[in-house]
Amino acid sequence: MDAQGIQEVALNVIFGLIIVVLAATLFRDVYKKRKMLKTARAEEDSMSELLEEELPEDKYVVLEQKQLMTKLGKSRADFIIVSVYGIFCLEFRMFYKFIKADEKKQQWFRYMGLKRTPFTSPLWQSKIHLYTLKEVIGTDKDIPCFPMAVFPSFDKIDEAEFAPTSFVGTYEEFLNFIDDQKEEVLTVEEVQAIVRLIEAYSDKVEEMDNITPPTSLPEEYRSFTDTKTFIEDAEEARKAKELEEAKEMLGDDLDEDDEEIDEKESGKEASAKAHTIADEASADKKEPEKKAE
């Protein structure tokens, strides 16, 4: 075999090894993501059983998937826990890797590698659900309410400072937060009355037509939402969506700096392209995503 033939064989071997390495890497990533998804689904499925087993039935009543009519429209609460210690409203989200959370913001961000995706804050949704429940219960009694946002146990959460009555954390931690609330404020009879009221109300909402969402944030929700960040989050979510559309249309492989729209100099050109393409493609600008369930 001459030198050229040896060189061709060597190149073929190297190329083959590269293919094997890439395939192995892809397989590992797919396997890891499937395993994480399986873990998240298992935790979500077991949450109901865990709550029933760990929370004494003479102190707590767990309600699942109750439909509520908020001032933004219909919304389904994952778990409502009515107890002698107050009312807990728990939202579970199956997101991966890294979460950036802020109590006052209506939009949070999740990161998968370099990709950043905005999503509606489950803690914010929980607060809206609790506000609705207070209206439904309609008592002058000051009932403690605890908004909760729970993520799979492998998630990492970058948290701003949260109120002591709010919980943002993982599946492994949320029961400790519930257990920490030990001041009894309701009798067992009052708990049962509230449960019956919520169930009757939810059944009624199921039969109702949805309302048209308002074009601006209802005044009642401004107490737990920074209205400035509400507007900023809507704009940032729109820009993030435009950037993703631009990347798909341009086929650009933008680096991490380009993901931070308008925050770094290297992202300005990509942002401008995103705006241009989005404006040409559609004049319809959508509001931030609502909870879809």
Image: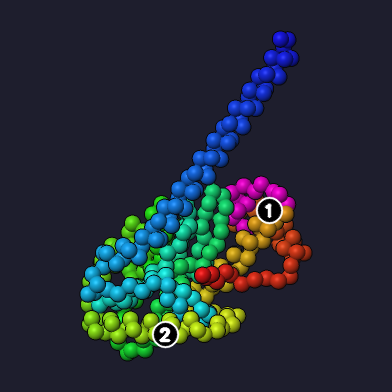
Q: Is residue 46 above or below residue 6?
A: below
Residue at image position (46%, 74%) is 76
Q: Is residue 112 left or right of residue 157?
A: right
Return the x and y of residue 288 as percentages of the image width and height. 58, 70
The tag earlier along the polypeptide, 2 or 1, is 2
- Residue 211 position by quadrant: bottom right
Give the overall secondary structure of the magenta segment.
loop
Please identify the residue farthest to the right as the structure is shown. 280
For mark 2, does the 10 Å Cα neighbourhood hold few (<14), some (14 to 19), or many (20 or more) residues?
Answer: some
Q: Which is more toward the observer, 259 or 288?
A: 288
Q: Which is more toward the observer, 224 or 174?
A: 174
Residue at image position (56%, 56%) is 116
Q: Which residue lies under the disc numbered 1?
A: 247
Residue at image position (67%, 61%) is 242
> Judging from the image, what secondary structure is the residue with disc 2 in?
helix
Q: Is residue 126 visible?
A: no
Q: How many marks?
A: 2
| Mark 2 and mark 1: Cα distance apart in space | 46 Å
State the scheme by which the image is colored: rainbow
Magenta stretch bounds: 250-262
Under mark 1, the amino acid is Lys
Quadrant of the image for the N terminus?
A: top right
Q: Which residue lies under the disc numbered 2?
A: 201
Residue at image position (40%, 78%) is 130
